[in-house]
Every structure is written in structure tokens, then in C-alpha cells.
């Protein structure tokens, strides 16, 4: 059913303009373009981002650069400028076809002077050729005949929320193509953009070349009569110095070989690609239309952000769909988004993990700067893998006291998270070549970091990790966060195992790598020893794992007593007060139980699930929480809890439940949603020996079908459908 | 002689492009435009600032907004774009006529393809109508005939070093006029700009209207033959919501009533105004051409930055000529620049002091926030008089450790400096009306600040001011800075005196004011008592005034031993180490002796001059130092020291002696230069009883003539000229 593939709105809501720009973002894994209107609208945040094109700025250090807008089309109807901010909107519809990535908008608009026009806009970012994007506008006067003027070009003045990153290098025209040559100001990445515009109408068309500095534009004038159409087709091409030697020449060449009207041809190629995408990863849910549409919507956003041909970029926390976190990548990528790719598009997972491999130098720098060995991955990572977490941000209520952000200093679990993702990728793909040539170096260098970072407590004869932040960021500067300590232990043990495996698999490669990294036999046995002495306590009486030293002594707050609320517990109580309570921003011990189920006894898991669930801010805490909570609820809690949290994740962006979807898609929530369906309801579990299924579908679901690639072979799972019963 | 009125360069030096943009800045007290090239040049910093139009940004809080550029003219000569970055420059001259503010550039340029053209550019910012600016371009092909295209418009994409402050509200054309309607993003100041362009040539001219979004442009095409001219005249008009209700309508109307070719008419009116300006304030120096030109250059820059019709703006430390200090005003205005206006243009001095009166609310806020009474003026002040000194700036060498700027917190002497300027203005002008209605409130409210800020030291039975920064910013967090303590004492005593004077002059106004401010009889006597107990020590044995508690215990560095050097002592030693020495960034005790000579015994003054002069970084310390040092050297040191420091100030911007003239004119140095000539060499001294002269001209000076207004009457001083001898 088409509606289960389509995100729609049937009226124009100016209040939701930024939220909808995020929802209707299009992309192809190379670029992402927010769902702004072709003709501009006040207070919009139109943006096109290209993976890997970062530039410096104050406070947040670096950000994805907004490219000159390829959407821009200004429309003058018998002299009146078309704008949804003026006149009257008699009809408005917008549809995003998730199956093809096509965005369609239909507007019936009455101008201030009473001219009524039908306008249809369509656009897509080609998946067949990621350097191409295409749009068309068809307009039809309903009650007048007169002149129509259409203007479109490329504006070098593109900025990021007011900050300009582009230096102009040149511009020009090739017939009905105009082009721009630009360079990012600090990082000096060159970009070439070109756009070709063709207009068709019944009457003659006059074309004007407006070679205005910084904004080359084509203007088209024609006459149109009642009921007749004017159609504009615009193709845009983008290349950067990260792709090729001469990005401008590439951009111009790309358009030069296309016919004037290429929509149909480009569209065919594009939809063929999308069809293949969905064949590999669609998830079918029957009996729950909202869930069906939501899972596709979230997978769509992962797919349009996924680098297919590049291994030096990652996916930012807000994908390529908004300014939130400025395109920086966190553990969100490896722990939340990556499983979807590992299981359905391993070549994309490999690209994303290779980004971490290529950025080992930045991680080594961070370790060295902090006085540690090996490689310490940055909490926030951008173009070159240096740490780019803001350190100080302005305090809006006190100009003299900036707010210190500590995550870049002490939220150290990310190095183990990345290794966990490498391990999972290898487990599922058995891509030995990757593990030997790239994954191993990631695992071993970060193991060296842990070995140097762990602190020997001589009194208690154990290794500790003090002054850290765990996944639950309501609590900072804590000692012995269970999640971090367990992951570090797991990591060192895997590194030890890897040493043996490498020597067995490929002795020569192992020797070379160990020599290069300065690893000897004793290093590996030392790691094993260290791992065995990492402090990972369990209270045998209560069966509880204390989230960090002294957590149980903090104030126990009855979350239910705070209801109804519309903001996070941290906002409600203040940063310091929230820190003093037991309330969690997101699962922490429960997250540990999710990632390392083999380390926790089921009875212990149940006790901890119950204890911590009651204390987790799942409504307004982290958007990373609900999906994990849903999976663990499937295993340890109630079906109601599972479904409630699943829907929380499902609605994160579609319903803007946290009020910040305008900043971009919650990529981790999108990836977590897939994990909830497949690992939670689908009950898929894997280990070195293979995979198994223990499904627990929500009661009202009639069918759940999904696919995954297991070591090179596609596996189709179909649960509860006509063909079979829910096992 | 014309050359003593003209700043010239005779070749193009790309290395000095930003420095020369500052030097060749034009303005009219409403707007300032840097000396960028009409046709653009890579890495330029073209900018037009309008007084009072500030907008917010990170780190530095607020800045003067760069307006859409009225200079922009792109020139295509038979298809080749004219640019000094391409082709060959066969001849290049630039002249700024200080007497009329006319900037002329002549270029003989050979294009890459060998076409040689003479181009002449002239422009001025009208002083007769400050909302108007005008430029013309005349080009003459030398060895070819062919097509010429000229393009010019208004670019809403104007940014401040990459940061955009403008929101686009609209644009359009009236015949050969194009216009823009804009609004600053945060402060929501509306601006209207319009520009009219007329081209004359032998052949027919084709005019194109390029209504490109954000950059309306007119393009002109014609044919020209060898030796014939094409001339473009461009007039621009700027209004803002600070000037009028409908700035766009005003800007359009301004141009609508002008003829197509208005250069001559506008030029006549403009030069008449400039003639009047110079008649009131020119300084004549014979026997020293460099000094003659330099004093005029510096007065020119004060004149073009001086608000003539506005009393809610001040002059920033870098005037309207660059991005340095973002247009913020410091004590530089009142103590360094203001005397020139007080003595030659009292109505401008009154405007500038009224800015402080209108901004009392911001100063009251600052006092309240800091826990004090009355009004505490901000160290850096911008649009609305709130404190806008940056508090934290990025540390380029350590991302986690920002640098704290303390001047906004503890450089408190500015409140007394402003009152000193009020007092001086009244002394010279006898503008009782101002003192009663505006000056009094400034003086009394800031006196209340001092009374609450001063700390009673019960053990020593005295008032102290601990944890301050004096004029010498190499030393921060010091106790009992002599300059600050003396000025506070002087200030409280003047406030006490003012109480009596007001009651005598205008009992009714006095009563109303005292009631409104909550001042009673006891307040004034308390102030007098407090003043008498402020700690202002003098070592009777050595005759030295210690700059602050413990200064003499700091390391004594032999400045001569650090020569030759090309950077400040602070840069050389580091911030902390410089703080540990006795080296000064600029005169501090000597500054005190300059401002309050009546408080210091001449023998004491001599000893302190000798001691502190040897320890002051006059070459690369503050640009505020040399002029004051020159004056005090005239009084207490040697004529050689006086002249050396005078020339240091004279060359600050012309020769870019500190390497940062590209950031804008050193306004304090410019104002200090005038003081050196008049108060130093001219030896003018004033007090309540009148003025007297004790000139000490540099030996090689043949004549020094200047004027000032003494209580409504113009006084002409002519020293050492043909008519008389140096007294």
C-alpha cells in the first residue's frame, strides 16, 4: 500500500516548518538536502550538506558546511512573487515517497491580487549518480493569463546559521548551465557546482543570463494562459576536492553530457537503485500501520545518510539533515546506526568502520595529549578524527561563566564502543580481510589506550577507571562506571584473543602489525591479566550492579511523582540536582546488559532491569534510550513496556516528541528502531557459532518480515505471516 | 601645498592591502567605508559600517555590522574581467585628499590577453548629506576597441569576517536605481539601501536589470574605441531604523530627487562642508612635512568617525575603519579622542558624552549585577551601553583552556575617566545646560558607584580598591592602583563640588535630580569624607608613587637589554612573566600625572617620570602610550624623547608600526597626537580661571598654528610663524 511508503502532510503549518524540513530531507549518501521550499520562506533553515566537507568556526570547532542551494527557484506570476508567506493557500500537500526518495508538493495558491495558480514541485537526489540532483516545477494558472518569470541559479553566499564558510573562486555560464567555483575558508576544500535549467511552455521563452557576482542566475520569461502549463526542470551537480582533482570541471562535465530534459532518464536510473536498496533491507510489519511507516521512514533516513563509495566519512548524530551537533559523529554511529548496515549493507558498515581506521592518527593524538598510550577515539569526530567536542559553551544567563562540556575529556567508553562495532561487523560478515588489515589496528591501539588509562588501586588490588562519564550523562565525573569498566574488560580480552587469532590466520601480517605497533608477546598476556583485575562489582545480596561508585547513595526520586512533565528531569531539577539523584538520562547498566548479555546472569539481569528501568528518564532523557529499553523490555520486562518504548523511538522525529527534530534526524534513534524490531521483537541473536531467533512480536502484529546478510548469504525472516505462525 | 594634504601611494603592494584599506577609509560621521577596490580583490576586507548598528555574535557578544557594499563595480573589458590579481599593472596611483575626503585611484592595466586600459576611480562619502555616497569610474582603452560591460548592485550577503548579520526583507528596482531592505538578525535594526547608476559613453548603452535574489544588479553594455571614455557614476543612499521610520523609503527618496548625473552638485556641497571642518580644526606645522601630513591624516580619521547629528553613538577604538574591537568603545574615546572635539567641535563632544548619559541604564545594570550602587560604566560599550567585553576567548594552543579576559570585570577606572571628560568639556565649553541636565547625572551616579566600590580597611583606617586593572594592562588583579585611586578621589571630590554648584546654579533642577537619585545632604559630605580617606601613598624618601601595592617588589627588567625587538614585552616574556616584572604596557602613574597635574608636586613628578619612563614598553606596548609619553616628555623629559614618541604616535597607522593597522585606525593614538601637539608642544593648559600657553616646539619646527573654542569663542594660536616668534 502506497500510504505505508509515504510521509504526507495535507496542510501547511508554518509552526512546523523546521521540523518538516528535517522530516522531508532527501539525500543519497553523498549529500543531504533539507526539505525547504524552492521559493524561500522566512525563518527557514534550508541546507545542503556533503559528507566530509567540514570547516572551522568558533565554540563548536568545526561543522558540516552548507552548500549553495540547488533548490532555489523564484516564481513570478504575472508580476507577483509566489510565496507561502503571502496571498492565500487554497490547497497544500506534501508527500515524501520513501520507496523512491521523491518529494512532491502541490499547492493551489491565490496571490495577493487574486491570481490563482496550481503549482507542483518534485525533486530527488539521484542515488544512481550521487553527484546529481534534479527538480521540476509545473505551474498552471487557474483564473488568469499573463507573464510568468522563473529565476534560478547558485548562490555562493550560502551560510551556516549566519556563518559563511565559502570563499568565492569563480563563476560562469555554459548556455543554460551556470556554475560556481568555491573553497571552504579554513579547511580549503574546493567545490564545483553547476546547474542546468530548462523551461517549457506553449509560448516563446526569453532566457536571460544574470551573471551577478556570487550568484549566477538564469531568468526565463514566457506567457501562459488559463489551464496551460509552464514547466521548469533543474539539474544540479556537485563535486568537491575530496572526490576528484578538478571539481568544477567534473560538475560541468556531468551536466554537459545530459540532454536538456533528462528528468525521465535520471528518474529511471534513480528508482532502480532505490528498489535494490529496499530489496535488501525493507522491514515488513502487518497489523500496525504506524509502526510499518515509521520503520521505513527511519530506515530511509539511515539509507540517505549512508556513505556508499567513501570510507573517510561517518554519519553524524543528526545525519545530513540539520545543524544539530554540526555533523559531528558520536558512538551513535557505531552502537546505534551501524548494526542496520552490518546486517543489511555490510559494505556500508565497512566504509563507516574504515573511517575510524583512517582516523587513528587523530585518536593517537588524543591519547598522547592526555598522557596515554595507543589510540583514544574522540567523543565527537568530524573531518579528520581529532577531538571536536566543544569544551566551553556560552551560558545564556551569565556572560562571565561559560559552561564546561566534559564529554570530550572523560566520556571514554567510545573507544570500546567502536571496537564492539568492529567485532560485531566481523562476527556477522566474517570479513577477515578487514579485521586483519584495518580492524586489528583499531582494536589493538585502543587496547593499549585502556591498558595505560586503567588505574591500579594497590590497596584493593584491582584496576579502576575514575572520573568518567558513562552512557547516562546525567552523572559526570563518576568512578568505576559499570558500563565503561565492563566494556574495557571485554575489549582487552578481545584484543588478547585477536593476538592469537591473527598469528594463526596470517602470521606474516600479524608479525608486521605487531612490529609496527611495538607489541610483544607480553603485551597480550598483560592485557589479559589487566582485564581479569578490572573492578566490575556485583552486590551478591541484592543482585544489583551499581552504576558507579556511590550511585546507590544518591537521592532516589520517584519519577512517577514528577508526572505529568514536558521536559527532561535534568531541566526540571537543574544539572547539579539531577546529578545528585539516581535518575538516569538513558540506560547504562541496562545498556551494558544489552551489549554483553553473556556476561550477566539472567536472574541478575532481571533485577537490574527492574531497578534501573524505574529510574530512567525515557520520555525526555536521551533519544538513545527508548529503543534499547524496548529491546530489554522484550527480553526482561513486559510487552507493554517494550511496545511503548518502541513507539517512543518510532515517533522521535515523525512526531517531534522532544521538540528538537528541527535540528535534524535522531540517527541513533532511527538505528535503534531497527535493532528493536530485529533484535527485540524479531529476537535475532548471533554469536561466533551462528544466529538464532527467539521472536516476541507485539500482540497486534500480524506479520514481521526482514532480511539480513549472514556471512555473505542473504537470510529472509518472515514471522507470523500467512505462510507461517509466530514461533 | 597639496602634498601636505594628500596620502599617496604610487605602486600597488598586495602585502599591504588590508593596511591600506584602513588608511584609505572614508566616512562622514554616519558611515565609514574601508579603502577596498571597487572591482574586488582576493583576501580583501571590504566593509562599510554605520554608527550604532550592532548585532550579536558569539565570543565578542556584539559588533558593528558590515553593510552591503556600495563600492561594488565589476568591469569587463572586451570580455576580460578587470582585476589587479590578473594581468599586468603598468601604472598605479592612489591618493586620499584629506582636505576633501576624496579618494582617487588611477590604474593603467594590461589584461591577460594584452588589452591596455586607463582606469580612474574617484569616490567620497558626502559630508553634506551623510546618507549619501558617490563614486565614479572612467575607463579609456589604450590599444583596442570593443565591448565594455559594467555591473554594479547591492549585495545582501554582506558579512563580518564570515558572519552574516542581515536578514533579507526585500529588493527591487526604480529604473536605474536598485534597492535592498534588510534587518539585523538579533537586534532587528532595519536598513534601507538604494543605489543609482548612470553610464555615459559615445555609443549606445544597453541596460540590464538583474533582479537576482539578495543581489539586485544593473549591468551596462556599450562599445568603446581607442582613446575614448566610458564613465560610470554611482550614488548610494543608506538609512536605518535608527534614523527614521521607513529607512527604505528614505533611501529611495534620497536618490529619486537627484539628477542622473549629480556628481558635480554633490561634490560642491560636500567640499564646502569639509572646508568648514578644516577651518575650525586644522593644525599647521611648518618645518616638518611628515608631522604636518600625519597630524592632518589623524584628524581626518577623527573627523570622519565623529557623529555630528547623533547622540546615542560613540566612536569605537578602531573608529569606523576596521573589524578590530568590533566597534566597541573604550576609555579611548573620552580620554584620548574627546579633547580634540571638546576644543574644536564642542557640539560633537557633547554628542559623544550624551551617548554615556543615554547609556546610564546599562551602567546601572552593571553596578547592580556586581553588587554596587549607582552606575558603573562598561569597559567595552556598544549599542546599548551594556558591558560587552569578551569574557572568554579561545586559546589557540589549548582547546580546553579558554583565556579569561578580566578588563570587563575589574578595569574600573573608566567610570572616572568619563567623568573627567565631562568635567573637561564643561571647563572648556561652560555648557551649563549640559552639566545640569546630563553631565550631573553621570557624575553623581558614578560617584555612588565609587562610594560603594571602595573598601574600608579598618586596620589602616583608609579606603582601598583591591583587585583592579589600571591603564597598564600588563599587570592585572592588582591592589590600590595609583591611577585608579587618585581618579576615584578626584571624582568624589568633583561630585561633592557639583552638589554645591548645582544647588547654587539651579536649585529647582538640583532638588529634582537629588530626589530622583535619592541623594541627600549627607551623601555629599560622605563622599568628601570618603575621598579624603582614599589610600594614595607617596614614598617620601624616594618621591615615588608606587603604581600598585607591591609593584616595586616585582622584577626590574632592563628594557634596553631586550633590544632590538619587534614585539611587545608581553609577547616576548609571556603574560604571566610580564606580570611579574615592572615593565609597563603604557604610562600609568605618568598618565595620572598627565590628567591631574595639580595633585602632584613638580619634583615628585620628575622623579616618577624618570622612573616609569625607563620601564614603559613604548615601542610595542599599547598604542595609547606614545602620545601621553610625548606630552610628559615635553614637560619633564627631553625634547628628543618628546619628538620620538610624538612620531611613534604619528606613524601608528600611516606606517603600521604595530602591524595591526589592518584592523582599523588607532583612534586613541590619533586623538593623542592632537593632544601632543596642542597640550604638549603648544603647551596649552586650562583651568577654571582660563587658559594659558607654555609652548615648547620641537627645534626644527618653524611654525605651529592651531585653533580652539574657549567658552564659545574661537581662539587662534600661531607660534613661531612669520608673524611672531616662539614664546
Image (tube, coloured by chain):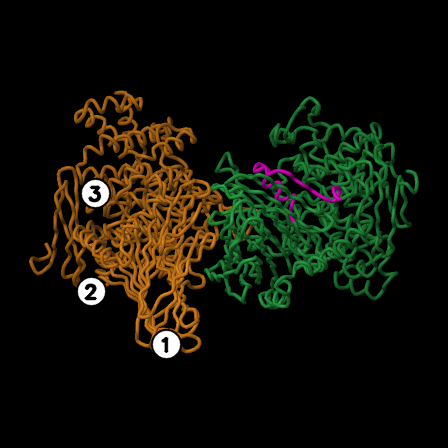
Chain colours: A orange, B green
Residue underneath mark 1: A145
Q: Closer to the camera, B701 or A456?
A: B701
Q: Closer to the camera, A453 or B717?
A: B717
Secondary structure of residue under mark 1: loop
Q: Closer to the camera, B630 or B538?
A: B630
Specify few, some or many for label 2: CA neighbours under 10 Å numbering under 14, 14-19, or 20 or more. few
Q: Is residue B622 left or right of residue B690?
A: left
Residue underneath mark 3: A346
Q: Extreme left residue here?
A: A723
Task: Return the mark for residue A2.
Answer: 2
Location of the N terminus of chain A (image quadrant): bottom left
- Magenta stretch encompasses residue A76: no
Q: Mark 1 lies on which chain?
A: A
- Label 2 – label 1 distance at C-alpha: 36 Å
For residue A260, which quarter of the picture?
Answer: bottom left
- Magenta stretch encompasses residue B20: yes
Identify whether A302 is placed above or below B290. Answer: below
Residue in the picture at 81% in, 65% down = B509
- Please tell me which of labels 3 and 1 falls first in the chain: 1
| Viewer can see residue A329 | no
Identify whether A494 is placed above or below B103. Answer: above
Observer-side mark, 3 or 1, equals 1
Secondary structure of residue under mark 2: helix
Amino acid at each position: 500500500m502506497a500510504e505505508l511508503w509515504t510521509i504526507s502532510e495535507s496542510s501547511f503549518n508554518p509552526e512546523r516548518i523546521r521540523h518538516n524540513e528535517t522530516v522531508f530531507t532527501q539525500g543519497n549518501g553523498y549529500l543531504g538536502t533539507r526539505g525547504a521550499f524552492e521559493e524561500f520562506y522566512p525563518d527557514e533553515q534550508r541546507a545542503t550538506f556533503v559528507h566530509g566537507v567540514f570547516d572551522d568556526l568558533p565554540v563548536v570547532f568545526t561543522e558540516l558546511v552548507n552548500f549553495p542551494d540547488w533548490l532555489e527557484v523564484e516564481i513570478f506570476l504575472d508580476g507577483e512573487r509566489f510565496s507561502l508567506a503571502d496571498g492565500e493557500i487554497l490547497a497544500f500537500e506534501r508527500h515524501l515517497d520513501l520507496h523512491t526518495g521523491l518529494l512532491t508538493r502541490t499547492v493551489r495558491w491565490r496571490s495577493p491580487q487574486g491570481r490563482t495558480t496550481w503549482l507542483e514541485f518534485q525533486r530527488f537526489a539521484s542515488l544512481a549518480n550521487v553527484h546529481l540532483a534534479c527538480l521540476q516545477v509545473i505551474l498552471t494558472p487557474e483564473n488568469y493569463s499573463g507573464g510568468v518569470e522563473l529565476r534560478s541559479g547558485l548562490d555562493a553566499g550560502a551560510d551556516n546559521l549566519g556563518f559563511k564558510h565559502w570563499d568565492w573562486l569563480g563563476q560562469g555560464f555554459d548556455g543554460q548551465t551556470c556554475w560556481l567555483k568555491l573553497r571552504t575558508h579554513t579547511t580549503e576544500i574546493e567545490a564545483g557546482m553547476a546547474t542546468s535549467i530548462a523551461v517549457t511552455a506553449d509560448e516563446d521563452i526569453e532566457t536571460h543570463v544574470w551573471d551577478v557576482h556570487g550568484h549566477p542566475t538564469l531568468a526565463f520569461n514566457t506567457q501562459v494562459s488559463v489551464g496551460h502549463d509552464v514547466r521548469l526542470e533543474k539539474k544540479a551537480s556537485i563535486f568537491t576536492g575530496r572526490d576528484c582533482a578538478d571539481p568544477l570541471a567534473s560538475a560541468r562535465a556531468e551536466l554537459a553530457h545530459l540532454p536538456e530534459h533528462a528528468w525521465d532518464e535520471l528518474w529511471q536510473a534513480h528508482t532502480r537503485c532505490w528498489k535494490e536498496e529496499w530489496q535488501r533491507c525493507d522491514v515488513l510489519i502487518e497489523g500496525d500501520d504506524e509502526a510499518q511507516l515509521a520503520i521505513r521512514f527511519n530506515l530511509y533516513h539511515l539509507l540517505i545518510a549512508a556513505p556508499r563509495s567513501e570510507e573517510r566519512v561517518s554519519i553524524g548524530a543528526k545525519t545530513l539533515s540539520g545543524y544539530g551537533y554540526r555533523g559531528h559523529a558520536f558512538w551513535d554511529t557505531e552502537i546505534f546506526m551501524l548494526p542496520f548496515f552490518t546486517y543489511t549493507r555490510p559494505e556500508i558498515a565497512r566504509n563507516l568502520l574504515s573511517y575510524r581506521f583512517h582516523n587513528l592518527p587523530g585518536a593517537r593524538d588524543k591519547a598522547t595529549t592526555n598522557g596515554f598510550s595507543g589510540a583514544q577515539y574522540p567523543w565527537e569526530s568530524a573531518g579528520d578524527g581529532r577531538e571536536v567536542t566543544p569544551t566551553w559553551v556560552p551560558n545564556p544567563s551569565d556572560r562571565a561563566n561559560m559552561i564546561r562540556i566534559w564529554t570530550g575529556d572523560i566520556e571514554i567508553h567510545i573507544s570500546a564502543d567502536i571496537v564492539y562495532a568492529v567485532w560485531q561487523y566481523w562476527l556477522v560478515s566474517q570479513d577477515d580481510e578487514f579485521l586483519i588489515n584495518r580492524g586489528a589496528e583499531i582494536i589493538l591501539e585502543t587496547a593499549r589506550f585502556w591498558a595505560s588509562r586503567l588505574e591500579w588501586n594497590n590497596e584493593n588490588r584491582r584496576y579502576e577507571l575514575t572520573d568518567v562519564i558513562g552512557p547516562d550523562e546525567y552523572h559526570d565525573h563518576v568512578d568505576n562506571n559499570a558500563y565503561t569498566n565492563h566494556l574495557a574488560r571485554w575489549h582487552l580480552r578481545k584484543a588478547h584473543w585477536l593476538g592469537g587469532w591473527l598469528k594463526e590466520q596470517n602470521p606474516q601480517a600479524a608479525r608486521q602489525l605487531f612490529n609496527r605497533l611495538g607489541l610483544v608477546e607480553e603485551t597480550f598476556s598483560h592485557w589479559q591479566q589487566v582485564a581479569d583485575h578490572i573492578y566490575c562489582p556485583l552486590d551478591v545480596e541484592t543482585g544489583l550492579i551499581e552504576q558507579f561508585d556511590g550511585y546507590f547513595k544518591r537521592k532516589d526520586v520517584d519519577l512517577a511523582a514528577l508526572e505529568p512533565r514536558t521536559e527532561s528531569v535534568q531541566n526540571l531539577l537543574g544539572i547539579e540536582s539531577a546529578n545528585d539523584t539516581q535518575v538516569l538520562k538513558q540506560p547504562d547498566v541496562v545498556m551494558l546488559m544489552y551489549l554483553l548479555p553473556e556476561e550477566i546472569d539472567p536472574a541478575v539481569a532481571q533485577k537490574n532491569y527492574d531497578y534501573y528501568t524505574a529510574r530512567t528518564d525515557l520520555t525526555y532523557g536521551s533519544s538513545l534510550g527508548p529503543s534499547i529499553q524496548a529491546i530489554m523490555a522484550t527480553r526482561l520486562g513486559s510487552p507493554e513496556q517494550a511496545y511503548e518504548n518502541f513507539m517512543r523511538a518510532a515517533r522521535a522525529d515523525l512526531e517531534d516528541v522532544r521538540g528538537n527534530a528541527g535540528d535534524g534526524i535522531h540517527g541513533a534513534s532511527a538505528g535503534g528502531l531497527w535493532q528493536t524490531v530485529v533484535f527485540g521483537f524479531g529476537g535475532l541473536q548471533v554469536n561466533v557459532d551462528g544466529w538464532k531467533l527467539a521472536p516476541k512480536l507485539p500482540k497486534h502484529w500480524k506479520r514481521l518480515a526482514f532480511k539480513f546478510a549472514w556471512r555473505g548469504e542473504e537470510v529472509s525472516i518472515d514471522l507470523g505471516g500467512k505462510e507461517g505462525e509466530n514461533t
